[in-house]
């Protein structure tokens, strides 16, 4: 009688324990925040699915344009996909969730590559004064230098969408040149401004302004700009590159106006994503 009583309670208990292991695990449907992304030539962007199992098969329609691979180690269970641009063009990436068998197609555009410099007023002088700065750049935070035959330049700042979020906005467009003369490096940029002297994208009504600055730039930064923007300058990797590695992610460049009293401070950034649809 004692043994039978134990069996009565053990069997239901085992069934209760084993039931969850027999149930089918439900995964959320594969879904992305956006179905269109851009990546520059030789650049990388990360695409994180909004939901999904994290177990995917990736298929690039034209693998000559870009490569795609899964990246591990991210906290999101949905995973992260790394896209690396190779050649300019448009094609599609098909992502298939191996657990739910769902597929999503993303359009990927590979654009011209670019370098981005954060632009700001120069540091205060010894007497505590801030040197003059172009008024048309007062609201601009970044200057994007595009590697194309037109030498396009974009003026970018941020627009708040809430107390904590913002979006990047292109406020102006122009052109740039970077050249060297007698051991000095110069950058000249031109762009259109409106009747209030602020950057504008309205080319018809815009008045063009131009500024030329002498840049106090180290050999690593100049070599990087030369390589990534195809400037055609005579540069090479500096011999003291080991000392410069720690500065590579953000390189400061003091800038002195030529023919004006203007001064500025540029910071060459290691990563920056231009607003989608501009390039």
Image: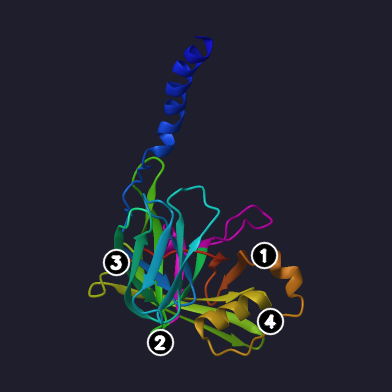
Pick whichever of labels 2 and 1 is earlier in the sequence: 2
Q: Which residues are magenta?
A: 119-147
Pick whichever of labels 2 and 3 is earlier in the sequence: 2
Instruction: Say which residue label 2 marks.
Output: 149
Pick whichever of labels 4 and 3 is earlier in the sequence: 3
In the rendered structure, find residue 237 and report the number of the disc placed on it: 4
In the rendered structure, find residue 194 and report the number of the disc placed on it: 3
Q: Residues within 10 Å of mark 4 (few under 14, many from 20)?
A: few
Report the residue that reaches farthest toward the front: 1
In what element is the residue under mark 1? helix
Q: In 3D space, how far apart are the residues under numbered discs 4 and 2 (Cα atoms)?
A: 25 Å
Instruction: Say which residue label 1 marks.
Output: 247
Which of the two discs, 2 and 3, sits closer to the camera?
Answer: 2
Q: Residue 172 location, x and y as percent? A: 35, 68
Q: Is residue 198 visible?
A: no
Q: Residue 264 location, x and y as percent? A: 55, 65
In what element is the residue under mark 3? loop
Residue at image position (29%, 69%) is 201
Kindly indicate whether the residue at mark 2 contacts the one at mark 4 (C-beta within 8 angstroms): no
Which of the two discs, 4 and 3, sits closer to the camera?
Answer: 4
């Amino acid at each position: 009688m004692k043994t039978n009583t134990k069996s009565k309670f053990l069997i239901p208990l085992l069934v209760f324990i084993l039931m969850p292991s027999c149930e089918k695990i439900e995964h959320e449907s594969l879904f992305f925040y956006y179905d269109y992304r851009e990546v520059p030539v030789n650049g990388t962007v990360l695409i994180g699915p909004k939901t999904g199992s994290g177990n995917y098969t990736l298929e690039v329609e034209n693998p000559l344009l870009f490569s795609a691979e899964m990246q591990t180690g991210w906290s999101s269970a949905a995973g992260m996909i790394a896209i690396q641009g190779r050649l300019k063009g448009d094609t599609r990436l098909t992502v298939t969730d191996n657990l739910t068998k769902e597929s999503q197609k993303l359009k990927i555009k590979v654009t011209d590559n670019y370098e981005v410099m954060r632009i700001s007023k120069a540091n205060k002088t010894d007497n505590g004064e801030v040197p003059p700065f172009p008024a048309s750049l007062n609201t601009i935070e970044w200057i994007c230098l595009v590697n194309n035959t037109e030498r396009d330049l974009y003026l970018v700042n941020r627009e708040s969408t809430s107390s904590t979020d913002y979006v990047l906005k292109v406020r102006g467009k122009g052109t740039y040149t970077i050249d060297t003369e007698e051991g000095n490096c110069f950058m000249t940029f031109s762009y259109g401004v409106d009747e209030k002297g602020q950057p504008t994208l309205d080319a018809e009504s815009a008045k063009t302004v131009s500024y030329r600055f002498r840049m106090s730039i180290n050999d690593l930064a100049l070599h990087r700009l030369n390589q990534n923007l195809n400037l055609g300058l005579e540069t090479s990797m500096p011999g003291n590159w080991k000392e410069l590695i720690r500065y590579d992610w953000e390189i400061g460049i003091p800038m002195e106006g030529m023919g004006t009293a203007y001064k500025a401070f540029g910071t060459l950034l290691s990563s920056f994503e231009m607003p989608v649809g501009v390039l």
